[in-house]
Image: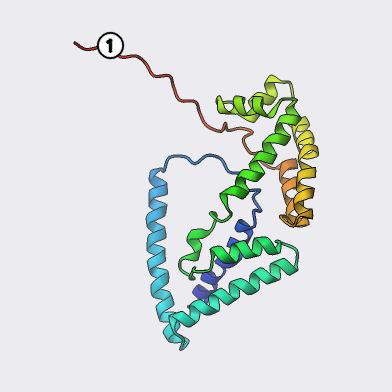
């Protein structure tokens, strides 16, 4: 039982990294939900019910009420965030945003928030900076690059059409994007550690939109014969 409690509470550590934007906030478009995704959702609901049952027993076993456990849980989140701010892993602004998002979360509801933290405005801001830097790396205007992507091309296809290798693209992209990241660190929107992780990903990791277009263009509608 004690092991189970530690596993549940440990989700708080995972969500802070996700909410801090460690993945650069750039995601591929969502795909239609598959049968396996439906099964995963059903399993998640079952796990949530089991967690609630566990926490009820746990409260009785340690002589505390559920409200007291939830209060202690919120305090643990606040203390963990304070530790991460102090160690430079996240900024105070990011910690405040995470704390606000988790203010009403309990040990059993917290896992559902993992991977969904971070505001859409932050994601859009980073994507905008990425696209601006990518366009310059390819020698294109930002408008032209967006048109190509909206037309169904991936970044790799656009780069190939303009005779830019992936290695050259990465080098130019990092050169173009780094000033924006430096400014974000100066303005305390990112930590130096987060900037380093972002640059490392751009050097060797999967590049956003490199192999997948923003979306596939819809097929042209075919005319149907008129009926009398």
Regarding residue 137, the answer to whether it shows in the image is yes
Circle 1 SS class? loop
Question: Residue at the location (47% across, 86% down)?
Answer: 62
Residue 160 in the image, given as x and y percentages of width and height: 69, 22
Residue pictured at 79% horizontal, 35% vertical = 171
Image-based side of 39 in relation to 82, left or right: left
201 vs 95: above or below = above
The residue at 78%/49% (across/down) is: 183
Neighbours of disc 1 within 10 Å: few (<14), some (14-19), many (20+): few
What residue lies at 61% left-to-right and 66% top-to-bottom?
13
| Above-or-below relation of 71 to 44 | below
Residue 14 in sight from this viewpoint: no
Instruction: Report the front residue among 19 and 179.
Output: 179
Report whether 30 appears left or right of 20.
left
Which quarter of the figure has residue 165?
top right
Residue identified by numbered label 1: 225
Colour setting: rainbow
Residue 177 place in picture, x, y as percent? 76, 40
- Looking at the rendered image, the quarter that the C terminus falls into is top left
Asked where in the image residue 56 lies, by quadrant, the reply is: bottom left
List the single residue furthest toward the bottom: 63
Tally the marks.
Answer: 1
Q: Position of residue 170 (x, y in %)?
A: 75, 35
Q: Where's residue 114, x and y in %?
A: 53, 58
């Amino acid at each position: 039982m004690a092991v189970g409690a530690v596993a549940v509470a440990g989700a708080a550590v995972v969500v802070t990294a996700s909410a801090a934007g460690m993945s650069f906030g750039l995601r591929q478009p969502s795909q239609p939900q598959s049968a396996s995704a439906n099964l995963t959702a059903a399993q998640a609901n079952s796990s949530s019910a089991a967690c609630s049952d566990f926490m009820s027993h746990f409260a009785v076993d340690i002589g505390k009420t559920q409200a007291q456990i939830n209060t202690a849980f919120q305090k643990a989140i606040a203390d963990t965030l304070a530790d991460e701010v102090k160690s430079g892993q996240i900024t105070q602004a990011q910690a405040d945003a995470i704390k606000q998002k988790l203010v009403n979360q309990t040990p059993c509801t917290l896992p559902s928030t993992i991977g969904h933290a971070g505001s859409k405005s932050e994601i859009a801001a980073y994507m905008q900076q990425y696209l601006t830097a990518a366009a310059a790396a390819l020698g294109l205007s930002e408008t032209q690059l967006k048109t190509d992507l909206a037309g169904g091309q991936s970044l790799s296809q656009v780069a190939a059409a303009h005779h830019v290798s992936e290695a050259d693209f990465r080098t130019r992209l990092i050169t173009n994007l780094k000033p924006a990241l430096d400014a974000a660190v100066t303005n305390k929107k990112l930590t130096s550690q987060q900037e380093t992780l972002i640059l490392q990903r751009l050097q060797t990791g999967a590049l956003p939109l490199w192999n997948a277009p923003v979306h596939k263009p819809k097929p042209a509608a075919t005319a149907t014969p008129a009926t009398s």
